[in-house]
Amino acid sequence: NVTGSLASGDRYAKDYQNPNSGDHVLIQTGTQGVGILLRARAEVRNVTANGWGRYGIAIFGAEADANANCSVIEGAYLLYCNLDGLLARGGDSNASKITGIDASYNGRYGVNDNSFLGNHYFSCHTASNGAGAYYSNAENNSSVFVGCYSEGDLQTQPFSVYTSKFGQDTTIIGGTHGAGVNNSGGSNCNYLG
């Protein structure tokens, strides 16, 4: 159960605690690393991962000794990372609940779900990410996005003008997707707008 900060990566993080809210802020001091790395089931609440070389939060279940299934992430700010604000990758990075995160100003996607079976996203926010707002297009991935939001701002070229990419097994329920929705999985994602 992680309710403050858990830092892992090849650089060291400065951990500041906001005296007003008690929230923890992880600020990267180099160009490499991951703000918060989950390789086991964990709960992460009310943290900020700012300016990391790779990802703000990474849920890795691809390694033989890693199983981060059923993790919980709530109220995280994932900002200015070189790649993705949040990345889920691998066979044991599924069935997690991600609620109320803000993944903005990242170099690639705000949320990049490359997990095997998918995760559940509720009331998430993205803006001004380099490649797009949300990506969930791995084979067999059946992620669910409920009431999520993306700004309609311009993204970095040469990426598609439709900047959220969802596969055929992804379900989107409500929300406002100003960045647009592009189904690149061969048939329509389940969009209940």
Image (tube, grey):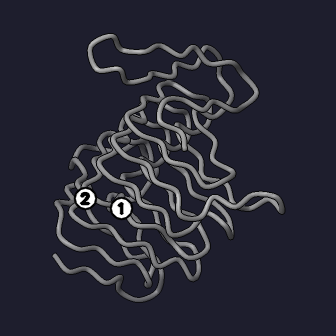
Quadrant assignment, res 105: top left
Residue in view at x 69 percent, y 18 percent: 12
Q: Position of residue 161 (x, y in %)?
A: 33, 57
Q: Nearer the viewer, residue 62 or 134?
A: 62
**Residue 20 against residue 113 in the figure, above or below:** above
Residue in view at x 39 percent, y 42 percent: 129
Q: Which residue is mark 2?
A: 148
**Relative horizontal placement of residue 38, taking residue 65 as reference (left or right):** left
User: Crowdedness of circle 1 by 10 Å Cα count: few (<14), some, many (20+)?
Assistant: many
At numbered mark 1, what does the secondary structure look like: helix, strand or loop?
Answer: strand
**Residue 164 against residue 83 in the figure, above or below:** below
Quadrant assignment, res 20: top left
* Image marks 1 and 2: residues in contact by CB distance under 8 Å: yes
Residue in view at x 32 percent, y 62 percent: 162
Q: Position of residue 133 (x, y in %)?
A: 36, 52
Quadrant assignment, res 52: top right
In the image as oriented, which residue stretches furthest toward the right? 64
> Which amino acid, by three-letter code, is at mark 1?
Tyr
Q: Which residue is mark 1?
A: 121
> Which amino acid, by three-letter code, is at mark 2?
Cys
Q: Which mark is residue 178?
A: none
Q: Nearer the viewer, residue 73 or 190?
A: 73
At numbered mark 2, what does the secondary structure look like: helix, strand or loop?
Answer: loop
- Which quarter shows the N terminus? top right
CA distance separating discs 1 and 2: 7 Å
Q: Nearer the viewer, residue 160 or 179?
A: 179
**Residue 13 against residue 185 in the figure, above or below:** above
Q: Position of residue 130 (x, y in %)?
A: 43, 42
Q: Nearer the viewer, residue 192 or 97?
A: 97
